[in-house]
Amino acid sequence: MAWYEKTQLGQKTDYIHAYDAGLLCPLVRKEGRDALGLTAELPFYGADIWHNYEVSWLDGQGKPCVVIARIVVPADSPCLIESKSMKLYFNSLNQHRFADRQAVIDCVSADLSHSSGGNVRVELLPVNQSYTLATLAGDCLDDLPLQDCDFQPNPGYLRAEPGQAVEETLHSNLLRSNCPVTGQPDWGSVQIQYRGPKIDREGLLRYLISFREHNDFHEQCVERIFRDILTQCRPEQLTVFACYTRRGGLDINPWRSNFQPVPAQLPRLARQ
């Protein structure tokens, strides 16, 4: 039996009316990292920053509350959490009574930490808070002319010019990959910040576009991009950050770096 056949992905599921932490489905990161050859000490640190725009529960008097949740899962946690199971878990809170917001934070943090094996941080944000939309930092690659693009990851497109190190930030909104179980597309924007030999921009864009028919989870796509750039272009410093659009009320924003901490605030893009 394939690992995904044990998850809720691609299966008919009933709406859960009672709180149930057992709905969370952890997936061992090591399996995906072994496939990438990341078997020794990881070349990065970081986190997976989730936003759940459909969080609700009942207060002590039985009145519904709604918020947006910001969830930070450390990249060194043994497991990531499968996204549909995350949605089902949060739905199970809808009819559950909590004394106050801190009780919700304590419960969700404990459940997600137990499932992932890491110290997960949870913030609850008001739904009527104003947000400033932003774009990713650096130069956008998307207007570069290309012909005959490939649609399976090809690190051979990644090239760097030997010589004096440069520092620059580049981004693209053309990242697309697919859920490895349902085949549904996952749309994202990716930002790459580095210091090292100058990376060929056309080759980098071709490489990012080559994920278009690739089946993998958000977190593993970002780790593949980080590994391939590090291996092919040899930067001294590298950060890869992706903002994926939401599905089922959830967006996932993996951050991987060998020199920068995870920022306190992420840019929120127009299509998020």
Image: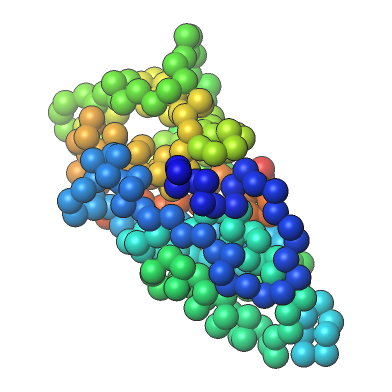
| Image spot of residue 59 (x, y percent) | 77, 85
| Image spot of residue 269 (x, y percent) | 61, 47
Q: Please give the name of the residue rendered at 47% of the width and 20% of the height, measured from the top-left corner.
A: 151
Looking at this rendering, what residue extends furthest in the left direction?
163
| Image spot of residue 101 (x, y percent) | 66, 83
Please state if 10 lies on the left or on the right of 62 as rendered: left
The quarter in which the N terminus is drawn is top left
Asked if 23 appears above or below 108 in the picture, the reply is above
Looking at this rendering, what residue extends furthest in the top direction?
148
Please state if 199 lies on the left or on the right of 88 as rendered: left
Number of numbered tags placed on the structure image: 0
In front of the other: 10 or 149: 10
Q: Please give the name of the residue rendered at 75% of the width and 61% of the height, measured from the top-left corner.
A: 15
Q: Please give the name of the residue rendered at 54% of the width and 34% of the height, measured from the top-left corner.
A: 178
- Colour logic: rainbow
Looking at this rendering, what residue extends furthest in the front direction?
1
Tell me if residue 78 can be seen.
yes
| Image spot of residue 50 (x, y percent) | 55, 58
Please state if 202 lies on the left or on the right of 69 as rendered: left
In front of the other: 59 or 91: 91
Tell me if residue 195 can be seen.
no
Question: Could you say which quadrant of the image residue 47 lies in?
Answer: bottom left
Q: Please give the name of the residue rendered at 46% of the width and 38% of the height, measured from the top-left corner.
A: 216
Question: Could you say which quadrant of the image residue 113 lies in?
Answer: bottom left
Please state if 127 lies on the left or on the right of 266 as rendered: right
Asked if 243 appears above or below 262 in the picture, the reply is above
Asked if 213 appears above or below 179 in the picture, the reply is above
Asked if 98 appears above or below 73 in the picture, the reply is below
